Image (cartoon, rainbow, N blue to C red):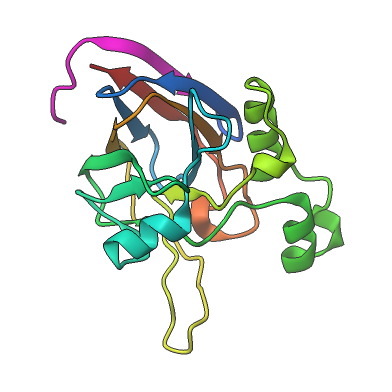
């Protein structure tokens, strides 16, 4: 792994749990998939502007690609760079698979899943720390998640392309709040049907 400089924060996020932190401009957030095949749902908000946040639409349009790779610039809804993917140990990351919710679990997998904890609930818990609520939810990034687009345009959710110890580094281009759901999904293979911990490191 590339050296990130002085470590500001180094925490392990338990399986299924939310996590939030402030990442200052020029600091790097490293996400490490500790046991492999774990999807990490991710949102960003400008720390000093309640209205500015990550925009999947602007990010996809700016790079002309639905997948995130090294060099991808993560754009805000105001058309400004929020962060850059500087290094990734996997080939690509997902921008369109969205976040699981109790409602989507019920629709996709049956009513018996209604009580299962989901990423939307994690995002709401994380956002509540900064005074944000459901209206502040936007389309998210899914680090390490494998969502191929089939020939007919359908999306697949298949086994992840990560492995134990693989990582992604994101350098902040502005002061931002990172909100993570260490995905609790057990009904599709995005986590290998077994959610596991991840490590979050902020440095620089």
**Residue 184, located in which quarter of the rendered image?**
top right
Quadrant showing the N terminus? top left
Q: Position of 125 compared to 204: left or right?
A: right
**Residue 181, located in which quarter of the rendered image?**
top right
User: Residue 182 location in percent, x, y?
Assistant: 54, 37
Residue drawn 59% across the image and 49% down it: 138
Q: Position of 89 compared to 189: left or right?
A: left
User: Residue 108 location in percent, x, y?
Assistant: 72, 67
Nearer to me, 148 or 175: 175
Q: Which residues are magenta?
A: 1-13
Q: Position of 178 compared to 167: left or right?
A: right
**Residue 18, located in which quarter of the rendered image?**
top right
Is residue 22 visible from the viewing direction of this image? yes
| Image vertical order of residue 84 relative to residue 156, above or below | above
| Image vertical order of residue 10 relative to residue 91, above or below | above
User: Residue 73 location in percent, x, y?
Assistant: 28, 48
| Image vertical order of residue 132 relative to residue 162, above or below | above
Residue drawn 51% across the image and 66% down it: 157
User: Residue 164 location in percent, x, y?
Assistant: 32, 39
Considering every residue shown, the one lying at the far left of the view is 2
Considering every residue shown, the one lying at the far bottom of the view is 152
Q: Position of 167 compared to 38: left or right?
A: left
Q: How many marks?
A: 0
Nearer to me, 149 or 162: 149
Is residue 118 visible from the viewing direction of this image? no
Quadrant showing the C terminus? top left
Residue drawn 54% across the image and 26% down it: 19
Nearer to me, 128 or 184: 128
């Amino acid at each position: 792994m590339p050296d990130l400089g002085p470590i500001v924060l180094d925490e392990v996020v338990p399986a299924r749990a939310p996590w939030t932190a402030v990442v200052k401009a020029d600091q790097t957030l490293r996400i490490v998939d500790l046991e492999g095949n774990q999807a990490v749902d991710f949102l960003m908000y400008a720390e000093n502007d309640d209205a500015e946040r990550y925009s999947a639409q602007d990010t996809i349009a700016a790079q002309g690609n639905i997948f995130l790779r090294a060099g991808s610039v993560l754009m805000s809804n105001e058309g400004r760079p929020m962060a850059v993917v500087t290094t990734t140990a996997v080939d690509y990351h997902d921008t369109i698979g969205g976040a699981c919710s109790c409602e989507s679990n019920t629709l996709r997998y049956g009513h018996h899943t209604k009580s299962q904890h989901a990423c939307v609930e994690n995002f709401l818990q994380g956002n509540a720390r900064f005074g944000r609520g459901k209206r502040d939810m936007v389309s998210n990034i899914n680090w390490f998640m494998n969502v191929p687009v089939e020939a007919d345009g359908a999306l697949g959710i298949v086994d992840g392309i990560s492995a134990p110890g693989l990582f992604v580094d994101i350098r902040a281009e502005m002061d931002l709040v990172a909100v993570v759901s260490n995905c609790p999904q057990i009904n599709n293979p995005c986590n290998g049907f077994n959610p596991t911990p991840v490590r979050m490191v902020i440095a620089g």
